[in-house]
Amino acid sequence: METFLQYTILGLVTGGVYGIAASGLVVTYTTSGIFNFAHGAVAMLAAFAYWQVRFDWGWPAPLALLAVLGVAAPVLGALIYGVVMRGLRGTSEVTRIVVPVSVMLGFLALATWIWDPTPRTPRLFLLFFGADKTVSIAGVNLTWHELLALVMAAVIALALRFFFFRTRNGVAMRAVVDDPDLLELNAGRPERLAMLSWALGAFLAALAGILITPIQGTAMSATALTLLVIDAFAAAMFGRLRSLPRTFLGALVLGLAGSYVIGYFPADRWTWTGNFRVSLPMIALFVVLLFLPQDRLRGTTILRTRERFRLPSVRSAVVAGLALVGVMFLLREILAPTAINSMAFSMTAAVVALSLVLLTGYAGEINLAVLSFGAIGAIVVHHYGVSGSGGDARTTLWGYVLAAVVCAVVGALVALPSLRLRGLFLALSTLAFGVFVSNMVLREITERKLPLLHTEFSIFPSGNLTVPRPKIGPVDLVAMPTFLMAVTVLFAVVGVGLVALRQSSYGRRLTALKDSPAASATLGQSPVALKLSVFMLSAAIAGVGGALMTAQLGSANIDRYDIFLSLSLLVLTVVGGIGYVSGALFGGILFGVAFVALQNTFDKLGVDYPDAEGLFDFLARFTTVLPALMGVSIGRNPTGAVEQIVVEFGKLRRAKPVVVAGCAAVAVGYLLARNDSISNWWFVVLVGLVIVAMPLAAKRLAPPPTAVATTDGHAAVPLELVGVARPFEPADRDMLDRELGLPVGGR
Amino acid sequence: MPLLEAQDVTVRFGGTAALDRTSIGVERGVITGLIGPNGAGKTTLFNVVCGLLAPQAGRVVLDGTDITSAPPHRRARLGLARTFQRLELFTSLTVRDNVRVGGDIRNRWTRGRADSGSDAERIIEMTRLGAIADREVSEIPTGRARVVELARALMTRPSVLLLDEPAAGQTERETEEFGGLLRRLAADGLAVCLVEHDMTLVMDVCQTINVLDYGRTIASGPPDQVRNDPAVIEAYLGTPEGVG
């Protein structure tokens, strides 16, 4: 009985802290409509900042608390909203998920930059009041710190209740949830309120982070704290991301469940207990999703999203695919073996990214854990797709087919509970799935005796998965250049297939579902069936891509399928242009080579020029934050980089000589590089220069015929707010006349 | 017996009843008008009928089948189609593809091999959208967009068509043309239910009119009768005492 009480109280303590974190998540989500994926990252930054001032610099606790909780955290929250999230009005759900994910990745990179993840002396984060201050409640010893956490949870719960129902700002915040436009017309200020709520959310995250760090007791880990967001959202899901009381209830349930698992599932008998406990929030999440009532089908919440993807014809896609294969063939001739390696890795990442183009670009659904599907693909190929042994081991075509099938089935299981719900919930399910795969499936490294089958089996043998390169019929892809070409061809074929799919009736139905679920359903489309089919197809592509990625590496450990890598790949693909096959290529190459190459270059420069080592060291570290910064920029340009490049190069049609000159320069450079007259680096520089210079030169030689007047500034203000949000202009009257069919400008 | 019937439908949003035991019937080959002041519950009734909103009480019956708990797509497959007051076009598709996708979806559920492309051309011609067929739907004026929604709905070959304020944003001439189109569709046997504020159009094309006010049916009958009904006049213009 005493142990039961012990575990109950421990569970209530962690549950209370989850509750504090989760309520912050609910507050920001309800007032701004943006799910703050960076919530855990804020908690993490706050914990590290507190450690810095309290334990490294030795400030007294009250001062340190004031600095972190009173100043730094709220300011950070307000800044996140003011600088980044505010720009997301009128963007699609995809952008509103990818940008906060980028912020999270950025904070994580920032933390590892400032606080070395492997310090010489472990960082000590002590309990408040020390470990020896204890009280005894019903025979259970409780530290003052734990008591404090419990009390804080209760105080926060009551204070939030009071704030939302009894104060002016709180009531106004609840109004923002219901209808921000209406509130604005009634002289409320939704922007200011949203900023306030983000400051409050960051404060709650910081409080949770500071309270939970010493309770967990282990060394401070940036990633573990960042993933606190998952525990928080699992709790928040109990309240459908809306209700605070139910959120607290969910948090307590989670805390207690985790505590009882530790107490009654002895780790010495079952090796998976620890992994299971970490996975509990994910499991709880799936259960909750199963019981959530169906969402109302939504119409287009925004009349015109800022993302515009134009549609390439299948013919031009075939031409582009052939060009890609050709370019890769030529590149292969001049690249060094290590560069061919990285390039091949990038192309496998690009294949994985294609699954995102299909799922996210075409269908508007989100998978935050593509590489977890990749891991499953690799596991299937490892176990069932290898023929031969030793140096002659090759993977078979059937192995990859099987991987695709298994991943499609797993995808269906992951997606089914949340397909009835909003896109965000599917995204959260995949995130939970990804963490679940990392925590439980990929940690199954020892052999287990399978019940009934009487065989020993290990999912992820000794923590290192070997997948040999494939041999398809007579074609042996063991040599890396051949493998590179094969993956490039595969990318081109799948890419052309996707473009053709988008043009087919299936593609049109996907687009319809993405643009207006309500209209699509009233035409007779079953949303769940269509979403399920596209998710399965996408998971299959991701699985094959992941298996190929592992084959490229030869063998991979658990870190290769990390959830944060999946998130990076998604962000970079969106940066490239999620609606385009070329966006996947762009994303894959950024993911595979670009940042690593950049970092290596800065490192080498630092060695070569010791005087400027500090600068180059800074730049090399800066590259770790770069992907996140690019992701955040998506809020400004949600259609992606490829679109801009296409637009810029579209101008070249009027300037043939420029194109000829540019191509000639690249051809000469290529030949010189091939003869080793110039190094490949100079060739890269040359190509870069040509790419930048061509549109500029074209602009000089052939200026655009007439500048087209844009009404972008006007389009941003909804019609009913004209005259409120900005002054009424003659142009508005003309527009009204036109729409009403009156003579324009007439009296 | 009407082809589509909503019987005693009640919908409450919080404390207010948007629909209070409202009933309406729509007959084959007849254009039925549904009018009432703003907030009377017209769009709410449409949402209940097509399955986007679950009522607290009441039934929806289509061709003898109770569809009250059927999801929207199943109702569409039974022959129900609608347009939206707040336009719900597929903004990343052209006008032509917006129409065509209606046929694509129908092909899917009928397991048919009909060519959605040529079907779409026929409907586009009938609705006179040919001139703007290759434009992006986000670029076309609201009045035309309403016709695109109608064309898209027709692609599913419905037996009942619900139109939510189709004339809003149309010019007078466009509305006239639209009225002619509706009459032809009804003459071909389609049951049409028209929510509209443009009284000229309503009085012109509807054989029977239902008037809603605060979620209750306050009058129904042929246009001339409804026009002179004191309750209707009161709902639209207020009571004489209120004016004084």
Image (tube, rainbow, N blue to C red):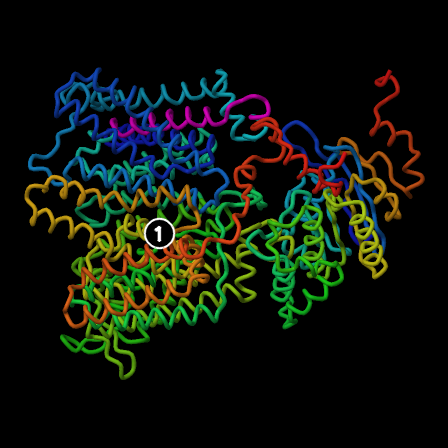
Residue annotated with mark 1 = A570
| Quarter assignment of residue B15 | top right
Query: Quarter holding the C terminus of chain B?
Result: top right
Residue located at (48% from left, 43% from top):
A91
**Helix, strand or loop under label 1:** helix
Q: Is residue B128 above or below residue A248?
A: below
Q: Is residue A305 left or right of residue A119?
A: right
Q: Is residue A141 left or right of residue B201?
A: left
Residue A196 belongs to the span the image colors magenta: yes
What's the residue type where badge 1 is placed? Leu
* Position of residue A745 measured from the top left corner of the image (x, y, whole percent): 71, 37
Q: Nearer the viewer, residue B138 or B82?
A: B138
* Position of residue A429 measured from the top left corner of the image (x, y, whole percent): 40, 48
Residue that extends furthest to the front in the rendered view of this protein: A701
Q: Nearer the viewer, residue A637 or B155?
A: A637
Q: Nearer the viewer, residue A62 or A82?
A: A82
Residue B187 belongs to the span the image colors magenta: no
* Position of residue A224 measured from the top left corner of the image (x, y, whole percent): 24, 40
Q: Does the magenta stretch mainly form a helix, a strand or a loop?
A: helix
Please state the extent of the stretch shown in magenta in the rendering: A184-211
Instruction: Return the chain for callout 1.
Output: A
Q: Nearer the viewer, residue A358 or A462?
A: A358
Q: Is residue A434 left or right of residue A524?
A: left
Residue located at (20% from left, 30% from top):
A48
Residue A359 seen in this snapshot: no
Residue located at (28% from left, 56% from top):
A689
Q: Is residue A123 above or below residue B122?
A: above
* Position of residue B63 measured from the top left corner of the image (x, y, whole percent): 77, 56
Q: Is residue B238 left or right of residue A246?
A: right
Instruction: Count residues near mark 1 (Cα–Cα under 10 Å), then give few for <14, some for 14-19, many for 20+.
Output: many
- The number of callouts visible is 1
